[in-house]
C-alpha cells in the first residue's frame, strides 16, 4: 500500500493517495506498533497530502499526532 500511496503522491494524484496511505498506516500500526517512527513517517506523508488538498485542519491534526508519537518513542528532547 505504501508504494502505491507514494506513487500517487509523486504524480500529484493526491485524492488517490489518501486511501493507500490510510491502509499502509493500519498495516504498519499492527506490524510495528502505533508509536513506531515508520508509522509516524507515513502519517506525515498523509498530512502532506492533506495540505496539497487544502485540508489544513486534518493535516494539522496528523502533524500533532506525529509529534506526540515521536516524543513518546524518542523522548521530548529529541525533537
Image (cartoon, rainbow, N blue to C red):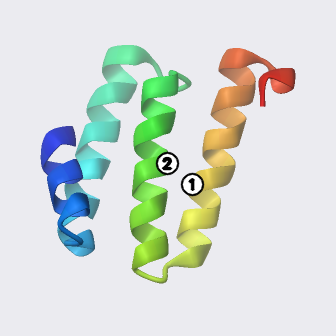
Q: Residue at x 39, y 27 (%)?
A: 29
Instruction: Name the side, left or right, on which 56 lies relative to 52.
Output: right
CB under 8 Å between callouts 2 and 1?
A: yes
Helix, strand or loop at mark 2? helix
Q: Is residue 37 above or below residue 50?
A: above
Residue 29 appearing in the image: yes
In percent of width and height, residue 9 lies at 25, 61
Residue most toward the front? 10
Instruction: Name the side, left or right, on which 16 lies relative to 25.
Output: left
In percent of width and height, residue 71 lies at 75, 27
> Comparing marks 2 and 1, which lies closer to the viewer?
2
The residues tagged by marks 2 and 1 sit, at their Cα atoms, a distance apart of 7 Å
Residue 1 appearing in the image: no
User: Residue 44, labelled with which disc?
Assistant: 2
- Residue toward you, 11 or 35: 11
In percent of width and height, residue 61 lies at 62, 60
Q: Quarter of the image containing the C terminus?
A: top right
User: Residue 62, labelled with which disc?
Assistant: 1
Q: Residue at x 21, y 51 (%)?
A: 5
Query: In which quadrant of the rendered view does residue 3 lie?
Result: top left
Helix, strand or loop at mark 1? helix
Q: Residue at x 28, y 50 (%)?
A: 21
Q: Quarter of the image containing the N terminus?
A: top left
Amino acid at each position: 500500500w505504501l508504494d502505491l500511496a507514494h506513487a500517487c503522491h509523486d504524480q500529484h494524484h493526491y485524492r488517490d493517495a489518501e486511501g493507500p496511505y490510510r491502509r499502509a498506516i493500519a498495516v504498519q500500526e499492527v506490524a510495528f506498533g502505533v508509536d513506531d517512527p515508520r508509522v509516524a513517517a507515513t502519517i506525515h506523508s498523509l498530512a502532506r497530502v492533506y495540505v496539497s488538498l487544502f485540508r489544513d485542519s486534518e493535516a494539522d491534526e496528523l502533524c500533532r499526532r506525529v509529534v506526540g508519537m515521536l516524543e513518546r518513542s524518542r523522548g521530548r528532547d529529541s525533537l
